[in-house]
Amino acid sequence: MSGTAARSTYKLFVGNLPWTISSKELRTYFSRFGHVANAEVVFDKQLGLSKYYGFVIFSQRDAYNSASNQNTHLLDGRVLNVQRANENA
DNA sequence: GTTGAGCGTT
């Protein structure tokens, strides 16, 4: 079909997170675009520190599109790097 | 306590 894979969720990769941002704060930020089904900052288990990137899953396409279409995302003084998440199947 | 280009720890 097209170059865009089908999916059942609307998932974003979020990079360049401030070190201090938690999953809760990530969800809070992206909730302005609509309902967030899940938001998680990836953590280094050994070090117990943020890896400064994470994932956000919206429950609605409209919210996903709104977040994706905004060119600049600013959180706690950092410009976030928001991309479509890599997802197969 | 530190750092900065990365798609995951349940």
Image: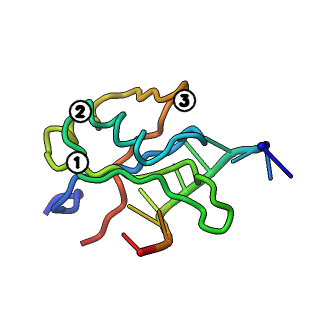
Res A78 label: 3
Q: Say what secondary structure mark 2 lies in.
A: helix
Q: CA distance from mark 1 to mark 2?
A: 9 Å
Residue A63 vs residue A17: left or right? left
Is A40 drawn above or below residue A36 in the view shown? below
Q: What amino acid is found at the position of numbered circle 3 in the picture? A: Arg
Task: Give the mark nearer the N terminus: 3 vs 1.
Answer: 1
Mark 1 secondary-structure assignment: strand
Say what secondary structure mark 3 lies in.
strand
At 58% from the left and 54% from the top, the residue drawn is A51
CB contact under 8 Å: marks 1 and 2: yes
Q: Earlier in the sequence, mark 1 or mark 2?
A: 2
Q: Name the side, left or right, on which A57 lies relative to A29.
A: left
Dot 3: chain letter: A
Q: Which residue is mark 1?
A: A58
Q: Chain of mark 2?
A: A
Residue type, numbered disc 1: Phe
Give the CA separation, mark 3 to mark 1: 22 Å
Residue drawn at 38 percent across, 45 percent down = A83
* Neighbour tally class for label 2: few under 14, some 14-19, many 20 plus, Cα within 10 Å: some
Asked whether the residues under marks 3 and 2 belong to the same chain, the reply is: yes
Whole-percent x, y for residue B7 in the image:
47, 63
Residue found 19% across the figure and 36% down from its top: A34
Quarter containing the N terminus of chain A: bottom left
Tag of residue A33: 2
Q: Is residue A34 left or right of residue A23?
A: left
N-terminal of the pair, mark 3 or mark 2, is 2
